[in-house]
Amino acid sequence: MRLKRNWRRNLGLLAVVVAVALLLGDYGRDFIAVDRCLDSGRVYDYREGRCRGGVIHLPSIPYAARSPALLAGAVAMAIFGFVLIALGRRKK
C-alpha cells in the first residue's frame, strides 16, 4: 500500500509543478513581450498580441481575460494534483 500512496503523491506533485510552470512560462513570455514593446517607445496591443507604433493609447486587458482557457486548465490540474497528494498522504 505504501508504494501506491507514494505513486499518488508523486503524480500529484508533478501535476502541481507542471501547472505552475505552464502558467509562469506563459505569463513570463507575455510580460517580456509587453516590456520590450514599451521599452522601445511603442504601444502593446493586448487584443492582437503585438507591438504597434503610431498609436497613442490602447486599453490594457488583464492576463486572466486574455488566457482564460490556460488559466482554467492550470487551476484544474493543480486541484487534481492537490487531491492526489491528499490521497497519497491519507493513512488507512
Image (cartoon, helix red, strand yellow):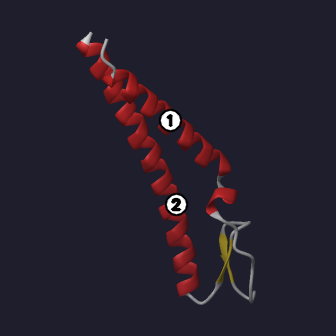
Q: Residue furthest left?
A: 2
Depth check: give the residue in front, 64 or 41: 64
Q: In this view, does 9 lie above or below 68?
A: above
Residue found at x 42% / y 39%: 16
Frontmost residue, 7 versus 55: 7
Q: In this image, 60 relative to 40: left or right?
A: right
Residue, x 47% and y 43% (percent of image)? 19
Q: How crowded is mark 1: few (under 14 residues within 10 Å), some or many (20 or more)?
A: some
Amino acid type at mark 2: Tyr
SS under mark 2: helix
Q: Which amino acid does label 1 sit on?
A: Ile
Q: Is mark 1 on a helix, strand or loop?
A: helix
Which labelled disc corresponds to residue 19? none
Quick check: 4 above or below 46?
above
User: Residue 59 at x, y = what percent?
Assistant: 74, 76
Marks 1 and 2, the one that precedes in the sequence: 2
| Image quadrant occupied by the N terminus | top left
Contact, mark 1 vs mark 2 (Cβ under 8 Å):
no
Task: In the rendered view, tell whether residue 54 sits above or below residue 3.
Answer: below
Query: Which marked residue is nearer to the observer: mark 1 or mark 2?
Result: 1
Occupied quadrant, residue 44: bottom right
The C terminus: image quadrant: top left
**How far apart in space, not on screen, are marks 1 and 2 (Cα)?**
20 Å
In x, y percent, where is residue 70?
60, 47
Report the side of 24 relative to 1 (left or right). right
**What residue is disc 1 on?**
79
Res 46 → quadrant = bottom right
Residue drawn at the location 69% of the way across and 58% of the way down: 65
Measured from the top left, where is residue 86 in percent x and y? Answer: 39, 27
Q: In this view, does 41 lie to the left or right of 56?
A: left
Residue under pointer 2: 27
